[in-house]
């Protein structure tokens, strides 16, 4: 019985640490350089703009101000995307000219 309790405790610790390491991977910023384009009509229903192979959106920055400009963006992959066969969604946190 004692070994069974130890086994379950170690199993729970392993599952929790595995989940935490998966979440920490998503905190890394991805840098992409290219021209920001308006998204227009798509078969998927997310994002507001496009850069390179990514769909992007921002809660802090008005991406429309950088339309058709070559910039470098820094952002995080939004968990749960891509969906509906669409591209990866990045949440833009910083833009550099």
Image (cartoon, rainbow, N blue to C red):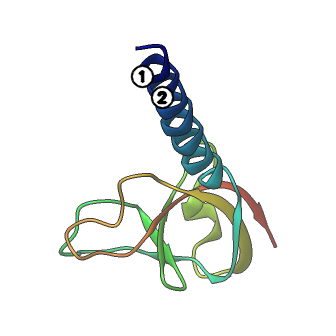
- Quadrant (top left, top right, bottom left, bottom right) of the N terminus: top left
**Residue at 46% from the left image edge and 69% from the top image edge:** 49
**Residue 52, above or below 58:** below
Count of all numbered marks drawn on residues in the image: 2
Which picture quadrant has residue 55? bottom left
Viewer-closest of 87 and 35: 87
Q: Which mark is residue 4?
A: 1
Image coords of residue 20 (percent x, y) = 59, 39
Q: Which mark is residue 7?
A: 2
Which picture quadrant has residue 71? bottom right
Q: Are marks 2 and 1 in contact (CB under 8 Å)?
A: yes
Image coords of residue 63 (percent x, y) = 57, 60
Q: Which mark is residue 59?
A: none
**Residue at 35% from the left image edge and 54% from the top image edge:** 80
Q: CA distance from mark 2 to mark 1?
A: 5 Å
Q: Could you say whether the residue bearing mark 2 is in a helix, strand or loop? A: helix
Viewer-closest of 24 and 83: 24
């Amino acid at each position: 019985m004692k070994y069974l309790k130890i086994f379950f405790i170690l199993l729970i610790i392993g599952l929790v640490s595995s989940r935490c390491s998966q979440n920490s991977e998503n905190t890394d910023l991805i840098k992409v350089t290219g021209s920001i384009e308006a998204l227009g009509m798509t078969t998927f229903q997310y994002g507001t703009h496009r850069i390179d192979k990514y769909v992007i959106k921002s809660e802090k920055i008005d991406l429309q101000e950088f339309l058709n400009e070559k910039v470098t963006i820094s952002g995080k992959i939004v968990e749960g995307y891509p969906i509906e066969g669409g591209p990866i969604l990045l949440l833009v946190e910083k833009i550099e000219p």
